[in-house]
């Protein structure tokens, strides 16, 4: 059997990771490899089986604490460099009790009730975007719809002016895409400084003139006398802005591509709109807007299925691999919008599960209902082989999705 190499950065893998992930899931489900923090080679493990990913989400020797896991040389070499203390100082990259404190504070502002009340506004934004699209014969679905829909929603929730919203796309892309050369790292440094300066100025405005938005809420929120520190507030806002749109952009883009490649499922959903909820869950499972869970490390040395995991080793929990595991899902490589049950891991699992999952689901439901209703002849404008995927270590998303009707 030909040896398969796990190369996260190769164009072949980026275009279609599933054959590689399937190979490792079947033959080497806990696969050792290396990641590079600048010029430093670090030990890492690729985890591809559903039950193993699930187990490590909750393992007592696995930590999310980026700041305290890396040594000073590793921090310096990694592309995040001096910005690590800001970028990773939020609930997504903390362990209890810090995680519990931060999540409790954010949950007081970013509430389920708030999300449920957004449906009418999401539908209104969606229709406005679709009406603009109708004036054209072909569009890039990402530019004209998949990106502006969630960005408008999260920006309005946070009180971000309309003229500033396109900046988030540039900043977010620099943070989440792979940067492994000096020029890219320099651009990243510049972008993150601009992003942080923007957030600093916005926070100061809210302190002087509070408003009815998430930023104002996070500035004043407290629990048992505890408030967010300045760095925690900056980091949390960055997380909410990036995570508040990236997953939905990829869900809409990847999901529409999958439906266009499986016309029978597209027509089934168009003819049976009552399937929308199970369809969204299946598109999350099948297209994996988030390919890998965010950074995790070994807190201590431990043995996992006979493998010696060393303290500090990176753990790449493969959500895309787990979501195609035949031991968990029947016919996992088939798209079935009626699949039920569907216990996918697209939003993670456990205490670090995505806080914004209900919002992403709601936006996805509105998006696909409206797109299929208003564009009955929607079709791809390019061949499958011409589709370009973003180079990201975490997210799986398209650079563009040219369509016509």
Image: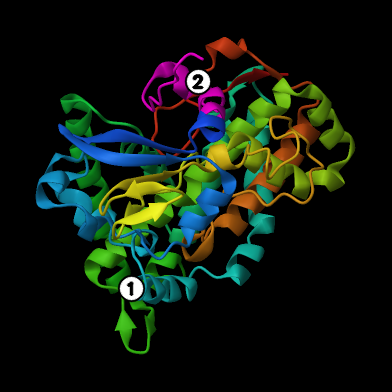
Q: Position of residue 316 (x, y in %)?
A: 40, 43
Rendered residue at 81%/26% (across/down):
376
- Rate crowding at label 1 as few (under 14), some (14 to 19) or many (20 or more) other CA atoms within 10 Å: some
User: Of helix, strand and loop, which one carries label 1?
Assistant: helix
Q: Is residue 62 left or right of residue 343?
A: left
Do the residues under discs 2 and 1 have CB atoms within 8 angstroms? no
Q: Quadrant of residue 186?
A: top left
Q: Quadrant of residue 103?
A: bottom left
Total numbered labels:
2
Nearest to the observer: residue 290 or residue 157: 290
Does residue 382 lie above or below 366 as drawn?
above
Of the residues under marks 2 and 1, which one precedes in the sequence? 2
Does residue 368 lie above or below 85 as drawn?
above
Magenta span contains residue 17: yes
The stretch in magenta equals: 1-23
Magenta span contains residue 36: no
- Badge 1 is on which residue? 98
Q: Position of residue 297 (x, y in %)?
A: 32, 53
Rendered residue at 61%/41% (across/down):
323
């Amino acid at each position: 059997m030909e040896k398969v190499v796990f190369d996260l950065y190769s164009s072949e893998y980026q275009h279609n990771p599933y054959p590689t992930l399937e190979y490792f899931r079947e033959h080497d489900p806990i696969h050792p490899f290396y990641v590079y923090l600048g010029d430093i080679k670090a030990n890492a493990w690729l985890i591809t089986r559903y039950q193993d990913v699930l187990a490590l989400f909750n393992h007592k020797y696995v930590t999310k604490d980026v700041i305290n896991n890396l040594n000073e040389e590793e921090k310096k070499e990694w592309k995040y460099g001096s910005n690590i203390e800001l970028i990773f100082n939020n609930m997504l990259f903390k362990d209890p009790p810090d995680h519990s404190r931060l999540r409790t504070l954010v949950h007081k502002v970013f509430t389920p009730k708030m999300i449920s009340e957004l449906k009418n506004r999401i539908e209104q934004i969606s229709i406005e975007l679709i009406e603009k699209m109708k004036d054209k014969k072909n569009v890039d679905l990402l530019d004209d719809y998949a990106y502006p829909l969630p960005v408008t929603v999260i920006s309005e929730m946070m009180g971000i002016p309309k003229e500033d919203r396109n900046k988030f796309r540039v900043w977010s892309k620099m943070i989440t895409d792979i940067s492994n050369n000096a020029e890219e790292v320099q651009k990243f440094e510049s972008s993150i400084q601009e992003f942080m300066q923007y957030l600093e100025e916005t926070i100061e405005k809210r302190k002087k003139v509070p408003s009815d938005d998430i930023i104002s809420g996070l500035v004043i929120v407290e629990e048992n006398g505890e408030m967010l520190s300045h760095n925690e507030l900056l980091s949390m806002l960055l997380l909410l802005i990036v995570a508040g749109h990236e997953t939905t952009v990829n869900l809409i883009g990847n999901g529409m591509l999958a439906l266009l490649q499986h016309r029978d499922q597209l027509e089934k959903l168009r003819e049976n709109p009552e399937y929308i909820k199970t369809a969204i869950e299946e598109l999350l499972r099948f297209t994996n807007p988030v390919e890998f869970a965010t950074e995790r490390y070994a807190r201590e040395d431990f043995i996992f299925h006979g493998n010696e995991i060393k303290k500090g080793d990176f753990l790449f929990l493969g959500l895309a691999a787990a979501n195609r595991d035949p031991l968990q899902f029947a016919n996992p490589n088939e798209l079935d919008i009626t699949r039920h049950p569907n216990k996918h891991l697209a939003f993670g699992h456990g205490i670090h599960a995505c806080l914004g999952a209900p919002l992403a689901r709601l936006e996805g439901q509105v998006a696909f209902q409206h797109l299929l209703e208003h564009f009955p002849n929607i079709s791809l404008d390019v061949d499958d082989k011409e589709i370009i995927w973003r180079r990201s270590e975490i997210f799986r998303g398209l650079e563009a999705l040219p369509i016509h009707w």
